[in-house]
C-alpha cells in the first residue's frame, strides 16, 4: 500500500497536469513544451508519464480596466519507483513569460523566489490543487547547488516540509490502489530559468529518506525547450 510520501508524489503530478486551470481568456499566450529526452531520464531510472497542455485563465488589471487572459502551460511528468516502493515525482513546466498592462501573465512568475515558495504551496493547498494532500507545512530551505539548465546557470534549491495525507485512492500503472492517511517528511527540489519567451521550471518531490539530488540535477541539465512530446493528455 502506498505510503503518504507516495500519495504526495502522485498527487503533485496530477495537480500540475490538470487541476489548476480553466479555459483560456480573450487574450491567450501559449508556451512551448519543455521535456527531458528518453536517453536522459531512462539513464536515471525514470519513466515518462505524459505531456499536457493546460489552459489557465484569470483576470489581469483592476476594475473596468481588467481583462481576461489565457495562458497555455505545458506540463511533462516523470517518475521513479525504487524496490522499496519509494516514488520520486518530477515535472517540467513551461509557461509563457508575457505581460499585459504591466502585469505578468506567467503563473510561475514568483516560484523562483525563495520567499514565495511556501506561499505558493499554501495557495495550491487552499485551492485543493494537491488532491488528497491538504497542505505542506514547515517548508524550509535545506540545500542548493548550481546547475546549467537550457544554457543558463541557475540554482537547484532543495526544501524540506511535512505533509498530511488523507486516505484515498490513486492510479498506478493503470490500476486503482488505496492508501492510508498519515504524515510524511518530504523533500522538494526546484529550479527555474527563463528561455525563449517562457519560464521553465523543474520540480521534484519525494520522501525525506530518499536522496535524488544528483539525479534531479542531471535531469534539469538535460531539459530541452522546445522539447519532443512523446505522449499527450488533453486537458480542457
Image (cartoon, helix red, strand yellow):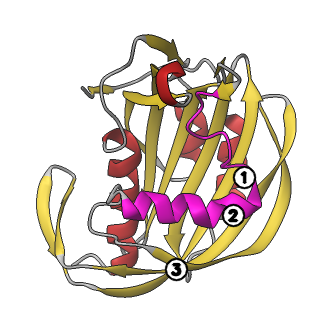
Numbered tag placed on residue 213 in the rendering: 2
Question: As displayed, is residue 132 above or below residue 105?
Answer: below
Q: Residue 231 or 143: which is nearer the viewer?
A: 143
Mark 1 neighbour class, 10 Å CA radius: few under 14, some 14 to 19, many 20 or more: many
Question: As displayed, is residue 72 above or below residue 221?
Answer: above
Q: Residue at x 43, y 31 (%)?
A: 58
Question: As displayed, is residue 31 above or below residue 176?
Answer: above
Counting residues from the N terminus, which is met first, the one under dot 3 or under dot 1? 3
Q: Which residue is mark 3?
A: 137
Camera sees residue 36? no
Q: Which residue is mark 1?
A: 217
Helix, strand or loop at label 3? It is: strand
Quarter of the picture containing the C terminus is top left
Q: From mark 2 to mark 1, how far is it between C-alphas?
A: 6 Å
Q: Residue at x 63, y 41 (%)?
A: 201
x then y, percent, for residue 23: 30, 24
Q: Residue 17 or 29: which is nearer the viewer?
A: 29
Q: Is residue 110 magenta?
A: yes
Q: Are marks 3 and 1 in contact (CB under 8 Å)?
A: no
Q: Which region is colored magenta? A: 104-126
Q: From mark 3 to mark 1, how far is it between C-alphas?
A: 24 Å
Amino acid at each position: 500500500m502506498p505510503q503518504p510520501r507516495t500519495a504526495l508524489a502522485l498527487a503533485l503530478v496530477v495537480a500540475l497536469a490538470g487541476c489548476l486551470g480553466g479555459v483560456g481568456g480573450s487574450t491567450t499566450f501559449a508556451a512551448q513544451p519543455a521535456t527531458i529526452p528518453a536517453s536522459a531520464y531512462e539513464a536515471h531510472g525514470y519513466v515518462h508519464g505524459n505531456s499536457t497542455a493546460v489552459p489557465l485563465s484569470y483576470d489581469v488589471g483592476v476594475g473596468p480596466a481588467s481583462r481576461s487572459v489565457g495562458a497555455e502551460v505545458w506540463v511533462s511528468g516523470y517518475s521513479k519507483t525504487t524496490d522499496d516502493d519509494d516514488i520520486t515525482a518530477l515535472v517540467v513546466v513551461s509557461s509563457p513569460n508575457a505581460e499585459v498592462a504591466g502585469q505578468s501573465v506567467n503563473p510561475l512568475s514568483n516560484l523562483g523566489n525563495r520567499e514565495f515558495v511556501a506561499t505558493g504551496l499554501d495557495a495550491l493547498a487552499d485551492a485543493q490543487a494537491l488532491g488528497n494532500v491538504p497542505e505542506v507545512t514547515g517548508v524550509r530551505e535545506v540545500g542548493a547547488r548550481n546547475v546549467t539548465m537550457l544554457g543558463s546557470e541557475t540554482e537547484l534549491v532543495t526544501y524540506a516540509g511535512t505533509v498530511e495525507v488523507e486516505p484515498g485512492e490513486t492510479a498506478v500503472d493503470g490500476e486503482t490502489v488505496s492508501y492510508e492517511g498519515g504524515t510524511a517528511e518530504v523533500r522538494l527540489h526546484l529550479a527555474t530559468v527563463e528561455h525563449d519567451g517562457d519560464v521553465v521550471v523543474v520540480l521534484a518531490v519525494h520522501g525525506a529518506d530518499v536522496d535524488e539530488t544528483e539525479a534531479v540535477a542531471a535531469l534539469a541539465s538535460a531539459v530541452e525547450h522546445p522539447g519532443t512530446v512523446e505522449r499527450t493528455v488533453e486537458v480542457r
